[in-house]
Structure formats: C-alpha cells, structure tokens
Amino acid sequence: MLGLKLPTDPGWVNLAEKSLQEILTDHAYCEQKAASTCISLIQTYSSKQEIVEQLAPIVTEEWGHFRQVLAELKKRNLSLGKQRKDEYVNKLFQCIRRNVTSDEIMLDKLLISAMIEARSCERFRLLSEGLDDAEMREFYRGFMESEAGHYRLFMDLAKKYLPEEKVKQRWLEFLELEAGIISSLEIRGDRMH
C-alpha cells in the first residue's frame, strides 16, 4: 500500500526496544511536529477549503497522540527527554522544489507529509509486530492505523488540488528521494525515523 522503496531494517525494532525512553521521547516530539505541520499548512493555504477542513481535526488528533505518548512515558516511570533534530524530516523538506509555482510547492509539502506518515506507519507496524511487550505492541498498532489514514488523507488532498498524473509523477520521485535519504541515515534505536 505505501510503496516505500527501502524497507526499514528489521533489526531496528530490537534497537528501539532497548531504548524505550528514547524512542517514546522521539515519538512524542514527532506527534508534536505533525500537529505543527498541519497548523502551518492551514495557515499557508487558508484559501484552500479542503486543506483547512480536513487538517483541522488532524491537528487535534496529533496533539492527542502526543498526550498519549506522554501518558505512556508516565505509566512506565519514564520522563520526556529533550527534542532532537530529525535528520530524516529535515532532508525531506530540503527536497521542496524552488522556482516552481505555488501549487507545485504545495504539492511537495503535502507529499512530504504523506511520506512521513507512510514511513511512520511502517515503523509503527514493525513495533506492533516485533516488540516483546504485548501492551506496547497494542499501543503501536493503534498508531500504525492512524498514520495509514493520515498518509491517505495527504495523498487525497494533493489529488484534490492538482492533476492526478502530476501527483503520481511527483510521488514516484519522492519515493526515490526518500529511499536515498533512508539509506544515508544510520540505523538508530532512539529515533522513529
């Protein structure tokens, strides 16, 4: 469904399990950044009614996810650590084209958001299937399902405002770019991406 070109190394789950506080911390900040990204898209594209109407509830949902992760940390007597730079997301945002139309920039932003949701969905699936802790497997299954829906929403919004063929073409380009980014990053158990 997601079409990612380079799957996550299955050994990542073992690293994440050994760094539970760090992975939950990084996950919490990812949810916070997802809410902020939706707010930014709403502000930037306030004249696009579908973007405003469709992303407003996602802001609330992502913030709710942030709070869920905080609750999980507290339940396990773990604390929220410091936010770290997300190399993966930063490298994706560097792929936004310059000197193109505003609609093409919007397309890139929507597809990058879809890509982040797709990779998060894939990682949450790995956690939901590979962690030893049954509660944590269930915890991440819910996030996996949510991210799949967000991925689809961003793709649908892109197709709402741009020709489907243009969206498909750019998505294929992003799949290649993202595979290159993933292959360039060190596999770390303390990062969601």
Image (tube, grey):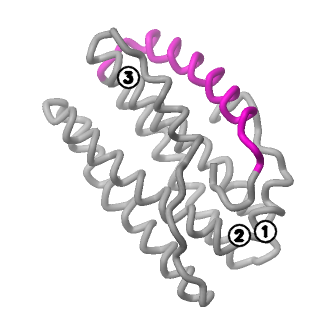
Tag 1: residue type? Leu
Going by the image, does 177 lie left or right of 94? right
For label 2, the SS is helix
Residue 79, quarter of the rendered image: bottom right
> At 38% across and 26% down in the image, what residue appears?
158
Residue 56 image position (x, y, % from top left): 25, 51
Residue 32 image position (x, y, % from top left): 41, 59
Residue 66's mark?
Answer: none
Q: Is residue 75 above or below residue 173?
A: below
Q: Which residue is mark 3?
A: 107
**N-terminal label among 1 and 3:** 3
Q: Which residue is mark 2?
A: 137
**Residue bounds of the magenta highlight:** 161-187
Tag 3: residue type? Leu
- Is 166 magenta? The answer is yes
Residue 131's mark?
Answer: 1
Nearer to us of marks 2 and 3 is 3
Going by the image, does 29 lie left or right of 15? left
Residue 6, quarter of the rendered image: top right
